[in-house]
Amino acid sequence: MSIKERLTEDMKQAMKDKEAGKLRLSVIRMVRASIKNVEIDRKKELGDEEVLDVLAKEVKMRRDSLEEFKKGNRPDLVAGLEQEIGILMGYLPQQLSDEEVRALVAEAVAQTGAAGPKDMGKVMSALMPKVKGRADGKTVNAMVKDALNK
C-alpha cells in the first residue's frame, strides 16, 4: 500500500472515529492537500519517495513553528504541534538514532576526505541522501559541524 493510499484509509478511519479523530483528521487532510498542491505544480502524480519529501517538509515546518511558540511562551500551541508532529512521524520511515547519525557523519567525513569547516558542503552532499527523511537536517548539520571542528 502506498503512502497516499494509507493516508486516504487513515482519513476515512478518522472520519468514522468522529470526535476522537478530529486532530488526526485535520492533519491528514492538510498533508493530503499539500501533496495535491505539489502534484498540481509538477503536473504529475507523486511517487512514495516524493510523498515522503512532502511529509518531511510538513514536519520541518511544524518543528520550526514549535521552536517559535516555545520562545513565545505558548504552551497551548506547543502541545498541539507536538501532537501533529507525532501523527506525521507515523508516516515517515523509522528515524535514525543520534549514534547512527554520528556513525554516518564519520563515514561521510572519511569518504570525502574533509579537513575542516570549509569542506562542510562536500560532507553534507555525501551524507544527505543516506539520511533523507530519516533524520532532521538541523541535527545532521550540527553533527557535521561538530565533526569538522575537531
Image (tube, rainbow, N blue to C red):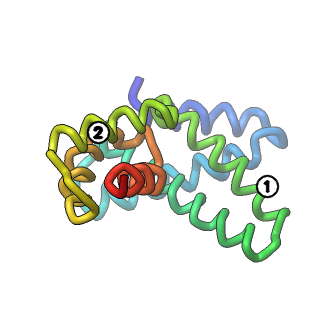
Numbered label tally: 2
Helix, strand or loop for disc 2: loop
Q: Position of residue 88 (x, y in %)?
A: 57, 43
What kind of residue is marked 1? Answer: Ala
Can residue 35 be seen here? The reply is no
Q: Nearer the viewer, residue 39 or 49?
A: 49
Quarter location, residue 130: top left
What kind of residue is marked 2? Answer: Gly
Q: Which mark is residue 47?
A: 2
- Residue found farthest to the top: 1
The residue lying at 34 percent from left, 43 percent from top is: 132
Q: Is residue 76 left or right of residue 120?
A: right
The residue lying at 26 percent from left, 42 percent from top is: 129
Q: Position of residue 51 (x, y in %)?
A: 37, 44
Q: Is residue 5 above or below residue 39?
A: above
Depth check, mark 1 against mark 2: the one in front is 1
Q: Which mark is residue 79?
A: 1
